[in-house]
Image: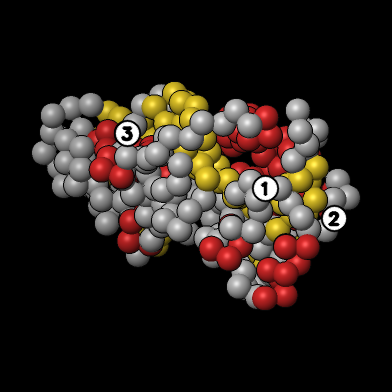
Amino acid sequence: MKELRIVFMGTPQFAIPSLEKIYHSHHKLVAIVTQPDRPKGRGKKVSPPPVKEFAIQDNINPVFQPISLKDPKFIATLQKLNADIFVVVAFRILPEEIFQIPPRGTINLHPSLLPKYRGAAPINWTIINGEQITGVTTIFIKNEIDAGNVILQKPVEIMPDETAGSLHDRLAETGADSLLESLNLIASGEVEVKKQDDAVASKAPKLTKEICHINFNRPAEQVRNWIHGLSPFPGGYAFLNNKILKFFRATVIPSENYNKVPGEIINITSDELWIACKSGAVSILELQLEGHMRMPIEDFLRGHPLRIAEILK
């Protein structure tokens, strides 16, 4: 099978399994492109992104961190690499003058079954919307975001009580396998692409602060899905006595109606906290009060006594 010369473009942890697969394959990794180092954590210490950390650990060079993807010098550098193909996993929107450089095109790994959930947050919206099946898709990049021709798709079953975090990790591994398989198909000339059906496309927009504010005036199952779909990051939240209370895991307490105000605390034990919803209630399993650590409900209740009839807003 022909060896492909590859430039890999990616930034977060999601991209690491794919990068590792390519690095240990028979293909040639000629360069990595990632985001610039940024301040991180409470101390705002400038730190490299996960993809650069991987490159340092495995002594992979060169690594480029352009501020602007339209910088003529950066584009000229990419052209001089003589790559056969560019691979993009969780990076930035590429300008046409970049994704058209390699003769074999530029491919992208997307964590959904396209054309469903095009956009910035497909994993989160998959959980929020209560889907039972998702997957990964590799596509050839074109100008329209996430709308390119499909190379491969692999479905993945969503587990009961799955969070966006656990699904993220599973899709990263499945996606890495699918990406390498796609590269091998391209190298052997056996790839057969399929056009996406724009008529059935759906969107997965960026998660805003407003979206993350949990609305308890929904059925309990939907509230649980929102909590899990935003866990662990950015985290669904409500206000308790003007302080932010983030939720990370919950279970559904079914019932037609408790005749309580949505958001009202209706049951507290040593290890349970029930919050009324439009119908039913959710039992919170893991949470974090502003200024404190994330913790299981039993630990939280030992240090933060709550009262029946308090209302989360």
Residue at (67% x, 39% y) in the render: 18
Q: Can you tell which quarter of the image residue 169 is in?
A: top right
Going by the numbered disc 3, the residue's amino acid type is Gly
Q: Which of marks 2 and 3 is in front?
A: 2
Q: In this view, does 8 lie above or below 149?
A: below
Question: Which residue occupies the foreground of this view, 167 or 17?
Answer: 17
Q: Position of residue 305 (x, y in %)?
A: 41, 47
Scheme by which the image is coloured: secondary structure
**Residue 85 image label:** 1
CA distance for labels 2 and 3: 42 Å
Residue annotated with mark 3:
130
Q: In this view, does 36 lie above or below 168?
A: below
Judge from the rendering whether residue 224 lies leftward or rightward of residue 192; answer left or right: left
Q: Nearer the viewer, mark 1 or mark 3?
A: 1
N-term-proximal mark, 2 vs 3: 2
Q: Which of 285 and 234 is in front in this view?
A: 234
Front: mark 2 or 1: 1
Residue drawn at the location 32% of the way across and 61% of the way down: 210
| Callout 2 touching callout 1 (CB < 8 Å) | no
Residue located farthest toward the bottom when viewing the structure as drawn: 72
Q: Quick one: label 2 or label 1, which is nearer the N terminus?
A: 2
SS for callout 2: loop
Q: Mark 2 points at which residue?
A: 61
